[in-house]
Amino acid sequence: MATGGWGPGPGAGQPGGNGPGGQGWGTPYGPGPTPNGPYGPGNGGNPYGPPPANPNPNPNPYPNPHPGPYPYGPPPGRPVPVARRRSCLWYFSPLFLAVLLLRSAHRLATKLFVHESGDRIVDRTVDRVQVARTVLGALATIGLILAYGVEKDRWNNAAEAGFANAIVTPFLLICAGPLVILGFIYYAPPHLRPHLRSRLRAPLKAVGWFLLSLAVVAAIIYFVGSSGVMESKNPWLVVPVALITMAAIFWGLPFLFLASLYSARSAFNTAHVHPMLPPVVTGILVWLLAIFNLISEGMPAGPPVAQFCSVLGGPLSVTAVSAWEMWRLRTRYGVTVRG
């Protein structure tokens, strides 16, 4: 009986059967695979062996992808600006020489009159408030001059007064500073007085450098102006003296101006003795300077309110900032006048 070629035949080896040796269709490609396959034990139906372990747990197909959002490594940074090359003539220009002289004078004045010690308290908030007070004071002065200044040379007078204050302030510090420091040391407890006296070296060095610089510059200018050496016909004498005079004028005078500013700001490094000394010295100095200006210039022009603000506005604001600085030292850093 026919079965269509794929059904079971009459038996193995019989015609029309599909078993081995039969004459039927049977398995078209030979016997079926063994349970373990021709290449060893089975691996779940994969004829090429077990898949290798993934060395990179990250699902990204690339070996070490960058964690950032940029897919091909870190994003390119900002281009580095190329330094502009200056012409060789720049190093012989008057502007370059002026910058060079001012920079060297500033560097030396900072080294001599700004003493940085390990125990000095640096409070940037106090520095910002002092700068803001100075700017507001300058703006108030300009406003009073614009509103009530009637003289033709009022701006020249204001500039001369400011320059005179910058020059006079170190001398007032030199005269009044020792008295204030001695009173401060005497007010301290007896067991702290030797320690405070031993730290007077930094203020004394600053005062000594200031007086020595002033004496040298003044002596050079006075000697050249009064001796008449520049009228000599000997070039071996005139040229060195001219160079020294130019150095004293173009470098020495800016150095003295910067030294005056730094000395007035740091009160000749009195913070090295005690952190409370700079606000105390500044509070006393500003009233001495106000009295000096009142005696030398008199009352400014304007109504009484403007005169009151012009004469007392600066000392009162500086005293307020100094008192606030002392309060901040006491509350924030635990520093007291007698501590």
Image (cartoon, grey):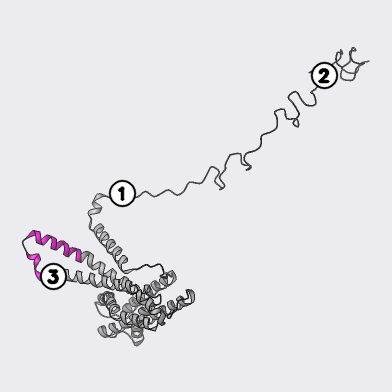
Span colored in magenta: 227-248
Image coordinates for residue 141, horizontal then vertical, percent: 33, 77
Q: Which residue is mark 2?
A: 27
Which SS type dominates the magenta stretch? helix
Q: Can you name the residue that lies furthest to the left here?
A: 233
Seen from the viewer's position, the closer of residues 227 and 76 is: 227
For the view shown, which residue lies furthest in the bottom direction?
304
Residue 248 shows up from this direction: yes
Q: Where is residue 190 shown, x and y percent of the image?
A: 40, 82
Residue type, mark 3 in image: Phe
Q: Quadrant of the C terminus?
A: bottom left
Query: Residue 238 at what x, y percent from top left?
Result: 10, 62
Q: Residue at x 70, y 32 (%)?
A: 50
At label 2, the amino acid type is: Thr
Magenta-drawn stretch contains 230: yes
Decide whether residue 220 is among the magenta residues: no
Classify residue 62 by image quadrant. Answer: top right
Mark sitting earlier along the chain (2/1): 2
Q: Which residue is mark 3?
A: 223
Tell me how far mark 3 sits from mark 1, CA to CA: 43 Å
Mark 1 — residue?
85
Q: Nearer the viewer, residue 87 or 46?
A: 46
Q: CA distance from mark 2 to mark 3?
A: 128 Å
Inter-mark Cα distance, 2 to 1: 89 Å
Q: Nearer the viewer, mark 2 or mark 3?
A: 3
Tell which circle, 3 or 1, labels the residue nearer the N-terminal end. 1
Picture residue at 28% right of the left edge, 76% below the top: 170
Figure quadrant of residue 233? bottom left
Image position of 310 with respect to 13: above or below: below
Of circles 3 and 1, the one toward us is 3
User: In the image, what residue occupies the spot 37% across and 78% down?
Assistant: 194
